[in-house]
Image: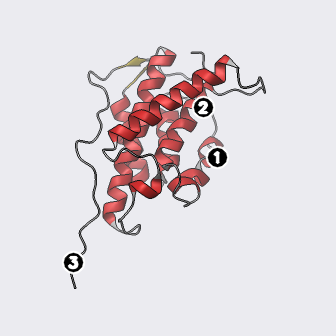
Amino acid sequence: MESIITYHATEVSPKAVQKRAEELYAGGYFCCEAAVASIRDAFQADVPDSVIAMTSGMSIGAGRSGCMCGALNGSILALSMFFGRTTADGPKDPKVNALMALSHELHDWFREANAKHAACCRVLTRGFDMSGGEHKKQCIAFTGLCAGKAAEILCRELGVKNIDPEPIKGLEKPYLPPKKEAV
């Protein structure tokens, strides 16, 4: 597919994108912001920081509402940054339908890769204390998974060399909330 933005990367490591997204989340960004920032930086995209700012409200399931996972939201927004449309060409526009197919691919992959078979933040975080460390560990991992997979899709669609020998792998088992001690 043809990108609507200019980017300069000729090769990308999706695993490095995964790791960087995890670091950005651990360092203070929310899931959605970390996904977009890591992808923008890895692909050397000529887009301003305001693109990252546009994602801030989508974190934690869209403004802490617990709807679609912010890591998935951010990664879909990153795909859209490259392949979205800027004209109202209707629902049959091949460009927007191609992007929606990529978004669907990422969504379905993430549902399986997170080992919980869900994309809803509320479901993914059920039972976790949102201020506790276990919740954050899970969300850091989800952010890395989504950003890494989005980077793989971008490499494939843009013709950018993916330098990783293996694809991004999902979790072998789900993160579970800590067991509550009986009182």
Quarter-of-image position of residue 156: top left
Disc 2 is placed on an element classified as helix
Q: Amino acid at mark 1?
A: Met
Disc 3 is placed on an element classified as loop
Of tags 3 and 2, the one toward the viewer is 3
Disc 1 is placed on an element classified as loop
Q: CA distance from mark 2 to mark 1?
A: 13 Å
Residue 69 percent location from the top left of the image: 48, 49
Q: Nearer the viewer, residue 56 or 58?
A: 58
Q: In the rendered image, which residue does mark 2 sit on?
A: 80
Q: CA distance from mark 3 to mark 2?
A: 45 Å
Q: Amino acid at mark 2?
A: Ser
Residue 18 percent location from the top left of the image: 37, 38
Residue 62 percent location from the top left of the image: 57, 54
Q: In the rendered image, which residue does mark 1 sit on?
A: 54
Q: Is residue 143 left or right of residue 32?
A: left
Q: Nearer the viewer, residue 108 or 165?
A: 108
Give whichever of discs 3 and 2 has the lower sequence position: 2
Give whichever of discs 2 and 1 has the lower sequence position: 1
Q: In the rendered image, which residue does mark 3 sit on?
A: 181
For the question of whether residue 6 can be seen, the reply is no
Residue at 52% in and 31% down: 103
Residue at 45% in and 32% down: 106
Give whichever of discs 1 and 3 has the lower sequence position: 1
